[in-house]
Amino acid sequence: MSDSIEVKGPVASQGVSEKAGFDDYRNSDVELPLDSQVEADLNVTENDLAEAKELASRLTLEEVRPMMERVLVIHENDPNFPYSIIQRIRAFLDNEAIFGNPEKHAVLIEEMKLEAALITVNSPYAEVRAVVDNHDDVDIPCGTIRAWTIGIGFSILLAFINQLFSIRQPAITVQANVAQLLAFPIGKALERLLPDVGFTLWGTRHSLNPGPFSRKEHMLITIMANVSWNYPYSNNSYQLTLAIVIWVQYLPAYFNQSYAGQFSYQILIGLSTNYIGYGMAGIIRRFLVYPSYCVWPASLVTIALNAAFHNDKNTPVQSPFGKIFTMSRIKFFGLTFAAMFVYFWFPNYIFTALSIFSWMSWISPNNVNLSTITGFNNGLGINPWPTWDWNTLLFDNTDPLMIPFFSTFNKFVGAAISGCVIAAFWYTNTYNTGYLPINSNRVFDNTGALYNVSNAVDERGLFDPAKYEAYSFPFLAAGNIVVYLFFFAIYTAIISYAYLYHRHEIKMGFVNLINSLRKDKGGRGDQYEDVHNRLMAQYAEVPEWWYTIVLAVAIALGCVGIANWQTYTSPGVVFYGLVLCALFVIPVGIVKAITGIEVTLNVLAEFIGGSWVAGNALAMNYFKSFGYVTCAHALVFSQDLKLAHYVKIPPRQTFVAQMVGTLVSTFVSVGVLNFQINQIPDVCTVNAPNRYTCPGINTFFTASVLWGTVGPVKVFGQGGMYTWLLAGFPIGFVVPIIIFYMNKRYKKTWMRQIHPVAIFYGALSWAPYNLSYIWPAVPLAYFSWIYLKQRYLGLWSKYNFVLSASFSSAIAVAAIIIFFSLQWTEVELDWWGNSVTTQGCEGDACTLFKLGEGEYFGPRIGDFH
């Protein structure tokens, strides 16, 4: 075998036929050693490449060909997979002369062997290789007594704190990364303090102290904490959860249904939505967990933090400054954590203008056009650098260090396109948007005031046509109109996208699911042959019937909860939610696993539910809850299953951890909810103590009555003002088809990075967010994922995800301390740096047009029905 490849122009001189026909194939005039060529193309470090060489030497041409065929089928349209490798594989498979006269193509064959071996012994993705170990030790302790104790403790603590403060203004949220951070010193302390005493059960010894606190124990604790903070009663984790439904049912100011305060009703509904999602996650794990292309970027940050605590390796790496970095990951985490902890006090408390850095609007705060275009709070946010606050970049959980650059950039492109549409609507006063703030997510009446739903319903909260016709049609701001347009588009786009780009993978998932149900077959399916599946095959799999039982019991609980109380809703709503989740969870999950962005089903569930049960706001709430929350929970649980898969936690221990964590946190949340309802005087009113004013409850009630009582039919149906927004459905379906066939026709590298669903997702990033939240992530993501990753892979692999974890953890800890030490006691700093952000139109949103005394806009009273 030759150890170099001579390259002359666009076509290699050896081993590649001219009919391969791609533009950039080894476009260089210098010879590159074979190892360097593969290292550059696959973004692989020398250590990973060395490990692959041994297997490559044993592979035959007959073995490599089907391996490469399978790689091409799965990864051909994968934007995370190096395109140069796809081109090389095509050249290899399309040239029959290689297989007829292999001795004349030795270099290309050996290169394919090396690449096949690398994919076999490790992940195809550099970001996964950077933090996920491709080795496992089955003897590492995992489900130990101390791990269960710490995990249950954090499940209780996170559920308690998050539920207690979810109705406060401002709310406070303690996420799983804080538990992960604190679990390490607690685990190490128990390692030193507890004696090695225990018992033997079913042949396995369980000790209070089985040895050093392990990375598997640490990750099991993190998984339990993660399911507990994503509890069913928070308006922080999801835009809609069942606690808000219960609050709206129970409070006298709303539906005044006293039964909603009963513990039995609350626990049935809570357990139902959680465990339906978990049952779905288990059944679909062959689609979203086992495939290697399902990267789940957020999981990599969690694993990076875990590895920083438990990995003793400290490989020196080259930096852009010409120096060799020898700092360990744990030391790097500590230094960057401390730096961000100190810095975050400035944009979050001391100098908030650093966070809302709309410096151009400060020039003339009352200039309507200037504030509309550049404003951070109430404008479009067009600003070359609008924030110095890292937390602003995390507004939708898409960290630029965590999410691939193509995803961040596609999201920005979508936001920029929709921003132009919003500006056009507002400045042309389309559908009277000029009388309203340009980028609000609220609903208005024909005077520009917030829509008062009590003027459209009777004393029972049901739709009153006479009062409605005497009041006003509900109006949406320009930003909100465009958001609805692209919401409709993204739901059909994700269907056509999933079929065109991932039908082979989805088919493989169904084949393996069917095989798992057969007695003569089982496990993970022989089509999942990557290294992590092979390592996990050493552990007993969770049978499908375990998840099926969980799903069946959860459905039964939901039906009992709906049927046994006066909910004005059929138990069929549970099955509706299950069907909606079943239709969308796989394509939505694939998109999230690849891009890191999640398409939520809240608007679709709201649209269908409001149309199906028009005039019944409470029933619509249940449609929205079971249709959206169950799918959102399924994705959360799927991500945790991938975490366990990466760290090699035995599947049955993961199953029990998620079941127990969910059960404990649900009961704790329900208990706290009852305390809030029964023990806090004047809760959810302006007179509530400690600012327990429930800021999201009134907004939710308004939305539920608007879309459940007034109904989508009146707003979007025939004769409705916003009927044309339904054009989003066919537009969304067609766009992925156009992009797919353009990509096949022109075969440009940059076109492969176009992700239609990510573009539509970016178009949703308005009302109340804007470009100021999205644009800063683009240059940062480029620097990380393009510049550093391509030029300093070792440095990027060692520190990138650790930096993401340290910044997120530091912000979470600092926010908690600021909240309890200063915001809780209402200690404020009153100076220009904190007040300039709310001056002029940035404080009170300006409108393009003003109404005179007694005037109103839109249809005349009596002309709408």
Image (cartoon, helix red, strand yellow):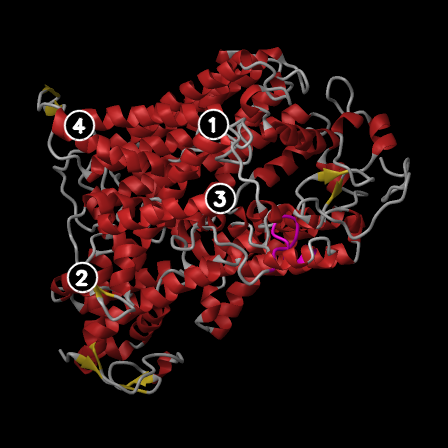
Mark-to-mark CA distance, 4 and 2: 32 Å
Q: Main secondary structure of the magenta part?
A: loop
Quarter in which the C terminus is drawn: top right
Q: Distance between the Cα atoms at labels 2 and 1?
A: 45 Å
Indicate whether residue 373 is drawn in magenta: yes
Nearest to the eye among marks 1 and 4: give it. Answer: 4
Name the residue: 67% across, 20% down.
254
Total numbered badges shown on the rendered structure? 4
Which label belongs to residue 350?
3
Quarter of the view holding residue 195? top left
Q: Is residue 782 left or right of residue 463?
A: left
Please tell me whether mark 3 sits on a helix, a strand or a loop: helix
Picture coordinates of residue 398, whole percent (x, y):
45, 50
Q: Residue at x 21, y 37 (%)?
A: 216
Give neighbour class at mark 4: few <14, some 14-19, many 20+ (Cα, 10 Å): some
| 402 within the magenta span | no
- SS class of the residue under badge 2? loop
Q: Which residue is mark 2?
A: 316
Q: Which residues are magenta?
A: 372-382
Q: Nearer the viewer, mark 3 or mark 1?
A: 3
CB under 8 Å between callouts 2 and 1?
no
Q: Which residue is mark 4?
A: 190
Residue type at mark 2? Pro
CA–CA distance in space, label 4 to label 3: 38 Å
Q: Is residue 750 above or below residue 463?
A: below
Task: Give the residue pinned by disc 1.
Answer: 232
**Circle 4 or circle 3, nearest the eye:** 3
* Residue type at the position of mark 1: Pro
- Does label 1 or label 4 sit earlier along the sequence? 4
- Please name which of the two marks, 2 or 1, marks the residue nearer to the observer: 2
Q: Is residue 800 above or below residue 552?
A: below
